[in-house]
Image (cartoon, helix red, strand yellow):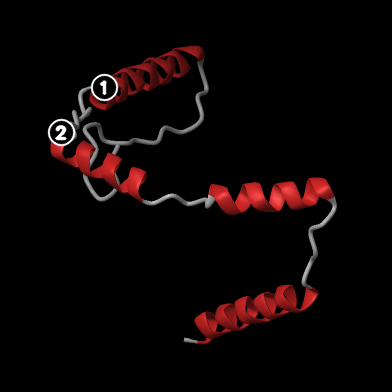
Amino acid sequence: MKIGQPSDLPITSTPPAASGASSASAKAASQGAAATASRNASSASVSVTVSAQVRTLTQADQSESADVDMDKVNAVRSEIEQGTYVVNPEAIADKLLANAKEMLDRTRS
């Protein structure tokens, strides 16, 4: 069932069943509605294709923009292994404050 569109089958409410016969008919109606919904869901599939041009552009974008500077990573890794890496707490504090200020500015605007 789609929101905002009428359903294929009207929804009816039945009072609580007093006998087994009316409960059996309610069960049959429920199963029929489920089967109709299943058929409608399976027939509503959509096929999507992506052109070769889009795939080429996506691959070019991914190869051009490296998210990680591996030279810098390897340099820091070797400094850590050698025990010569020095942490600059002032630079870390400055970056934390700048990030906090940026987040506050975004929430205010």
Which quarter of the figure has residue 62? top left
Q: What is the crowding at mark 1: few (fewer than 14 residues within 10 Å), some, or many (at least 20)?
A: few
Horizontal side, residue 15 vs residue 95: left or right: left
Residue 58 occupies quadrant: top left
* Whether residue 103 is situated above or below residue 28 in the rendered picture: below
Please, what secondary structure does the residue beneath circle 2 have?
Answer: helix
Above or below, comparing residue 70 to residue 102 in the picture: above
Query: How far, Cα to Cα, is label 1 from label 2?
Result: 28 Å
User: Which mark is nearer the camera, 1 or 2?
Assistant: 2
Name the residue rendered at 65%, 76% in the picture: 95
Q: Mark 1 points at which residue?
A: 42
Q: Which amino acid does label 1 sit on?
A: Ser
In the image, what residue type sits under mark 2?
A: Ala
Residue 8 locus on image (x, y percent): 21, 33
Residue 31 in the image, given as x and y percentages of width and height = 38, 17
User: Residue drawn at (29%, 39%), measured in percent from left and top?
Assistant: 59
Q: Residue furthest right?
A: 83
Which residue is disc 2 drawn over?
52
Secondary element under disc 1, as helix, strand or loop, is: helix
- Quadrant, the N terminus: top left
Q: Earlier in the sequence, mark 1 or mark 2?
A: 1
Towards the viewer: 48 or 43: 48
- Crowding around mark 2 (Cα neighbors within 10 Å: few <14, some 14 to 19, many 20+) is few
| Image position, residue 22 (x, y; %) | 43, 18
Side (left or right) of 21 relative to 105 = left
